[in-house]
Image (tube, grey):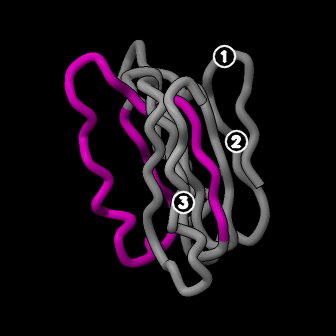
Amino acid sequence: SVLLRSDGRAVACGDARLGQCDVPDTEEGVTYVHVAAGLDHTILIRSDGRVAICGPTQPGFSDIPEPEAGVHYIQAAVGQEHLLLLRSDGRALALGGNRHRQCSLPTLEAGG
């Protein structure tokens, strides 16, 4: 489990054998703005729009692309072997295992 404190720090607890509770420190002036926990990994979105991952990464997790200028990640959802990221421009990104089509995002209508 992971909690986001009002001061922008994150606290994780639970089974930490795989490093999923080892929340990395941030640089001066950078905080966490969104957090999500999966089975063996924790995803943290930083105030600079970058994404931090704790714990073992599933195939594809290390392929999180840097968004183009003016766009940043704002929300995350995590499953057992996959993660979803929402960008500030409304686009979503799915990474990781897709055995049950959990990374097969539907096409959204404009304005949705």
At which x and y percent is residue 4?
71, 32
Asked if the residue at tag 2 contacts the one at tag 1, i.e. Cβ–Cβ closer than 8 Å, the answer is: no
Instruction: Classify mark 1: residues with Cα within 10 Å, few (<14), some (14-19) or many (20+).
Output: few
Quarter that holds the C terminus? top right
Residue drawn where x is 58% and y is 36% of the image: 75
Q: Give the range drawn in magenta.
A: 50-79
Of the pair 39 and 78, the residue shown nearer to us: 78
Please tell me whether residue 7 is drawn above or below residue 13 in the rendered image. Answer: above
Q: Does dot 3 land on a helix, a strand or a loop?
A: strand
Mark 3 vs 2: CB contact within 8 A = no
Residue 73 lies, with reference to residue 19, above or below; the image says: above
Instruction: Nearest to the eye among marks 3 and 1: give it.
Output: 3
Examine the image and state in which quarter residue 16 appears: bottom right
Q: Which residue is drawn at 52% across and 59% down?
A: 105
- The residue that label 3 is drawn on is 83
Above or below for 2 versus 38: above
User: Which of disc 1 and disc 3 is earlier in sequence?
Assistant: 1
Q: Does dot 1 land on a helix, a strand or a loop? A: loop
* Quadrant of the snapshot with the N terminus: bottom right
| Side (left or right) of 40 relative to 91 | right
**Horizontal and vertical percent position of residue 97:** 49, 79
Residue visible at 44% across and 37% down in the picture: 91
The numbered disc on residue 89 is: none
Q: Which circle's residue, 3 or 2, is located before the other in the chain?
A: 2
> Measuring 66% from the left and 16% from the top, which residue is drawn there?
7
Asked which secondary structure carries label 2, the reply is: strand
Q: Residues under labels 3 and 1: Cα distance?
A: 25 Å
Disc on res. 11: 2
Furthest residue toward left: 69
**Callouts 3 and 1 close, C-beta under 8 Å:** no
